[in-house]
Structures are given as C-alpha cells and as structure tokens.
Image (cartoon, rainbow, N blue to C red):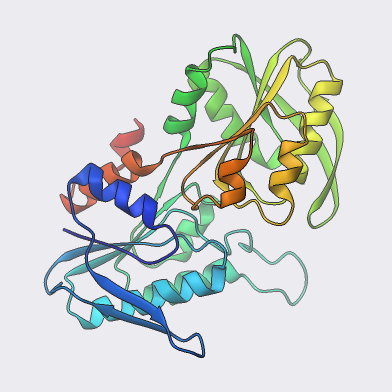
Amino acid sequence: MKLLTCNANRPLAEAIGSYLNVDLTKAMIKRFNDMEVFVEIQENVRGRDVFVLQPTSYPTNDNLMELLVTLDALRRASARRVTAVIPYYGYSRQDRKTAARTPITAKLVANLITTAGANRVVTIDLHAGQIQGFFDIPTDNLYAQPVLVNDMKNLPDVTDPVIVSPDVGGVARARAHAKSLDADLAIIDKRRERAGESEVMNIIGDVKGRHCIMVDDIVDSAGTLCNAAVALKEAGAASVRAYVTHGVLTGGAVARVANSPLKELVITDTIAATEAVQMAPNIRQLSIAPLLAEAILRISEDRSVSSLFS
C-alpha cells in the first residue's frame, strides 16, 4: 500500500499514516509562476495500491486540479490501482438541475476524476447519496455518524437529548442519529428565499426544556444553523449544539457561530481547520482519521467496508 497526499489537508493524511503505520509517499506538488499545477511522484509506485487523499474544499478549483494531475501522474507511473480518497467532495451541492440551463457539476467532477485515472473513490457523507451513481467506478461513501454519535454519548452535561434536523431535507440523517442515541426527533421547517439566506418558520416536535443537538452534513455560511439555534432557544430549549461533518465555514461564518446561541459547533477534520476555526471559542473538531484509515486498510486487503457501520 502507498498513501499519498496533495496539499489540501496534510494533517489528516499524516494522522491516517500514523494510524496505519505507513509513511506518506514522497511527492512534489508545486505551482509554476502562472499557477499551473506540477506533480512529480518521487517514489516507485509501479504495481502498487495507491491511495491519494485530497478534499476538494476551498480553494475548490485549485484543490480539484491538484487531485486530477496527481491521479494522471500515478496512472502514467503504472500504479496497479489508484483510489481517490476525497473526504469532502466539492461541487456536491450541484447534484441536479435547479433551473433551466444550469449544470450538474457533481457529475462533471465525477467524470473528470474517472478520466484522470482513479480506479476507485472514497468519500464521507456525500451531500446527496445519488452522487455515488455519477461514478462509473466503485465508490464508497463512508458515514461520520459513528464518530459524531460516540462524542454525543460522552457529553457531560446532556441528558435526554433531542436530535434536530435543521431542515426537512436532513430528516433521514437526523433520524439515524436519533435511533443510535435512542433519542427523540424534532424538525426545523424553514423557507429559503434565496441562496445563502434562510428564515425559520416552525419547529415540529417538543424542545422545551430539552438539550437540542442539530445534525447536518455541511455548514457553510452557518446562517441556517444560527437561525435555527435562535428559534430553538426561543421555543424554550435548555441548550443547543450542532454536529456537522464538513466545516466549510466561509466568509463570516466563524464570527456568526461565535455570536450565536450555539453552545458548541462540532465538526470533523474532513476539511483542514483555518486559524479562525482553531481560535473560535465554541467550535470543536473531531478526527475522522481512524475511520478513514480502517476503510483504506479494508479496501487494500479486499475486505468489507460496509461492516464498519453494521
């Protein structure tokens, strides 16, 4: 097995390598003066099973291009099998046509990754499950739920929690978390007037005096989560936390979370934390490295990956 990382999230790759007791493959990934990406694999990978870790997070296009060029370099270096490990799959929110003459960019990116030379793809908590079908190669969509639920169980000041879906579209995810915790479920009914803005309309479920835990896959501007936290507190919630897999946190999101009623926002390290995230008083990061490492090991040994979640 060979484990190689691009530049988007080296700390996560190092943690996975440490878990597997595998050194990262030496590679040079740099930019020319005009910002073209250049990749040179500095170890022999002929006939090897190579895993390339690269979330396509901000800057999305640069990180995606790094991944594509690296995949091409490995294919031309005669690697036996190349697996693209993409903890955060950029463009996943463009999974369907939302209006006339708009693209389905998640499918375009899947085509690019396949054409570049990937034989297999590993992701975590895809925004839309059907994106797995956009690939014509084997795709494993892992779930951060075991990591998040284990942390929820160990919260010292939370008894009898209620799991909250911040929108109707996330009900299935929230229900799965509620089932794992044997907890009640509540739903935020909201109306989004335009992209990036949301208005909380109604709360379905009993949250008065309860410790509320919202769950979602992506937090970007944090507007939805913060508005939902305000609504839950106004409805009498004792406390409000949020557990989100991918902490995109663009623009003023970190400041928005810091000034919100959220007692805590818990994210994973699928995306490398910025300095602002690391310094935020109420944002905490969990490591997804052991889960990814186990999946990588099972794929390399041709063992079941789904049994990780059974």
Quarter of the picture holding the N terminus: bottom left
Residue 143 in view (yes/no):
yes
Q: Compared with residue 44, is residue 256 higher up or lower down, i.e. above or below? A: above
Quarter of the image with the C terminus in it = top left
As drawn, 265 above or below 18: above
Q: Nearer the viewer, residue 79 or 267?
A: 267
Residue 296 on image: x %, y %: 26, 50
Q: In front: 238, or 106?
A: 238
Left/right of residue 293 with respect to residue 124 in the rendered view = left
Residue drawn at point x = 61 percent, y = 9 percent: 160
- The residue sitting at 17% across, 46% down in the picture is 21
Q: Residue drawn at (59%, 12%), measured in percent from left and top?
A: 157
Dividing the picture into quadrants, the one containing residue 80 is bottom left
Give the percent coordinates (x, y) of residue 248.
60, 52
Residue shown at the point (48%, 89%) measured from the top left: 33
Q: Residue furthest bottom?
A: 34
Q: Residue 143, position in %: x, y? A: 44, 41
